[in-house]
Image: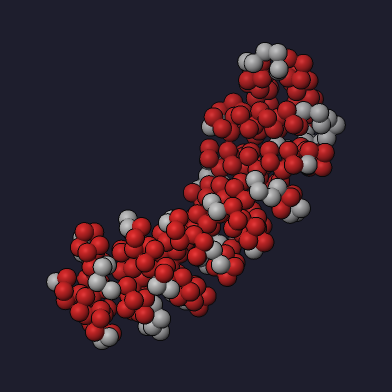
Amino acid sequence: MEDIVVESLLSGNREAQIEAAIELSNLTRKQRQKLSEREIIPPLLSMLQSQDCITTEVALSALLSLAFGSERNKVKIVKSGAVPMLLEILQSEKKMVILELAMAFLLILSSCNKNKVKMASTMLVQLLVGLIGLDRLTIQAKVDGIATLQNLSTLHQIVPLVIASGAPYALLQVINVCEKSSELADKAAALLENIISHSPESISSISGAIGVLVEAIEEGSAQCKEHAVGILLCICSYDRETNRGMILREGVMPGLLQVSVDGTRRAKEMARELLLLLRDCSGYVIKNKQSKIEIVEQIMREIDQEGERIPGTMLKLVEEMISKLST
């Protein structure tokens, strides 16, 4: 059977190639790895250029099965010219199942460190940034696209390209419209925190950005809240005088205080650090709830007076704050 698969793929007969690609996807991992040494990757890549949707779909599935779990095959596939072909598919394909397969394929290929520099072209990054904002794209395809950008962004030299392609705005839009407790929101917030840590000024100028992040702190999953707090901490640390007032005016305090009590360990630490950065801001209207402002100011004054002297004071005072805000 293995010999037949190889012969069929190398034959050039399209029907035989389609059947072989389907069979390849059904083989065991060990069998697939053995076949990958027999020059079957080039004919599978040539099938990606077909105008026939079935041919493209089965070829993508077969290539995915070869790449999965094999760093060697991931490198081979990229060296053989897969990325430009995938770009063409993403730019022109209308069938959603093929778009999903192409996005998943890019994610798997980008997980290999040796591929990242070769994959990180301006065209690919711009295309991915554009695609994650499309309403018609499925949630899973968006998750895979964001995860691919996250993989590429682990190379610091690629981050400026991601930012220049409009990723901060696109990711904020994703967080704004999706369920804040979803995997999509988690992935978007994680990537946004990563790139903002390199360029905090790239988000502070975006209208409505802080409001979206405050909502994520209030409604997101534990991971989403952690990343949202991290982003606000980053931009407040970068330009405290400009940004702390903007953050307070969006009503961050209740959510931030809650995270400082029951967030992840990292979220708690960052929330408390952000609280201290915000502590000198008084007199701002927080969603027109003056009584709560007065409570905030009172508690934060006590933190200023005792927080450094008594390590457990901040948590105790924050818990008191949450209790008062609940009444």
Q: What quarter of the picture does the N terminus occupy?
A: bottom left
**Residue extending furthest bottom?**
13
Which of 231 and 6 lies nearest the eye of the viewer?
6
The colour scheme applied to this rendered structure is secondary structure
Q: Is residue 308 visible?
A: yes
Residue at 60% x, 56% y is 157
Q: Position of residue 134 (x, y in %)?
A: 57, 66
User: 295 left or right of 40?
Assistant: right
**Residue extending farthest top:** 310
In the rendered image of this protein, does residue 303 appear above or below residue 14?
above
**Residue 53 at least partly seen:** no
Q: Quadrant of residue 314?
A: top right
Q: Nearer the viewer, residue 219 or 79?
A: 79
Q: Residue at x 37, y 76 (%)?
A: 45
* Vertical side of 202 occupied by 9: above or below: below
Q: Residue at x 70, y 18 (%)?
A: 307
Q: On the rendered structure, is 86 left or right of 300?
A: left
x, y percentage for residue 35?
23, 68
Q: Is residue 129 above or below residue 227?
A: below
Q: Between residue 13 and residue 217, name the one nearer to us.
A: 13
* Residue located 16% across and 76% down the image: 4
Residue 142 image point, x, y percent:
51, 60
